[in-house]
Amino acid sequence: MITLNRMDPYQSVYPVSPRALLLDFYGTLTTACTRGPAHDLAPRLLGVQPEEYRAVLDSSFYARCRGAYGDALETLRWIAGELGVAPSASRLRAAQAARLMAVRADTRLRPEAFATLWRLRRQGIRLAVVSDCAWELPEIMRGLPITHLIDAKVYSVHVGHCKPRPEMYLAACARLGVEPRDCAFVGDGGSRELTGAQALGIPAVKLSAPDLFDHLVFVTDDAFTGPSAPTLPEATALALSALSPAP
């Protein structure tokens, strides 16, 4: 059982809700993620080759998403060090600005995302984003049109853990003021997030949208055998159908 108190950093400011939906962000609320051409600018500013830069990004994904190398600038300095360069402070800031611009350019909400979240809010469903991400997403999220529809945003880089660790899901439950049994989860399956939710008794549904064939993902949820749906509205409806009706 989750106990909420004044010392709990995930204390919810909302009354307890009978039902809630936890959603992955990349590949779920967004279309498939790929690295576009804008990602070549940051390594050029650092003085390294883009393909070498991308290789370090890939191999350090989960460590970066746990905040293992410090804040955004410290993380980029670590990446540069791994590639044998030591950029000046101004060059490092310019490269980080270029990285943020590139990640923002690649973050495209699904056309149905806003309407789906809006309808769920109208139904009284509490909503949380639970995302494995580095420092860029918290910055980008503030400018997205869906941000005010989401009651809680749980970022791995803030929590210090990645999915499928229970801390990610439990942080969302605590911030929403609900028990895991009153939540459902929807995601594309990266980071074994679906089986991670199920391990806590949270019903999970896989979004199997056609565009996800080219989605950038590092660990797939091959053990998941639960339900799936091809669109975000269908996936969220299916997930909520697994919960008891609101009283």
Image (cartoon, helix red, strand yellow):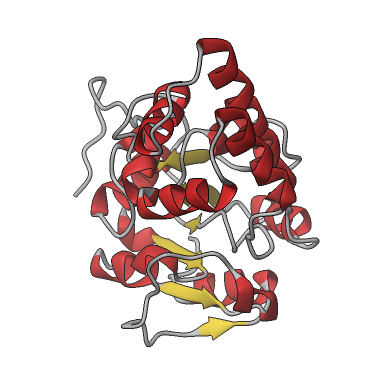
Tell me where residue 75 sits by quadrant.
Answer: top left
Measuring 34% from the left and 50% from the top, which residue is drawn there? 62
Say which of 9 and 243 sits in front: 9
Q: Choose between 87 and 77: the one closer to the eye.
A: 87
Image height check: is 208 above or below 167? below
The reply to whether residue 5 is visible in this rendering is yes
Q: How many marks?
A: 0
Q: Quadrant of residue 198?
A: bottom left
Q: Is residue 6 left or right of residue 55?
A: left
Rendered view: 211 above or below 131: below
What residue is rendered at 30% in x and 26% in y? 9
Instruction: Kindly give the residue lying farthest to the top in the view shown.
Output: 89
Can you say whether 118 is above or below 185 in the image? Answer: above
Q: Is residue 132 visible?
A: no
In the picture, measured across the screen, residue 33 lies left or right of residue 181, that is right
The image position of residue 117, as x and y in percent, is 68, 54
Q: Residue at x 23, y 21 (%)?
A: 7
| Residue pictured at 29% horizontal, 37% vertical | 160
Task: Please provide percent x and percent y for residue 68.
Answer: 29, 35
In which image quadrant can residue 136 be found? top right
Residue situated in front as seen by the camera: 162 or 64: 64
Pinpoint residue 238: horizontal percent, then vertical percent.
56, 77
Decide if residue 21 is on the left or right side of residue 61. Answer: right
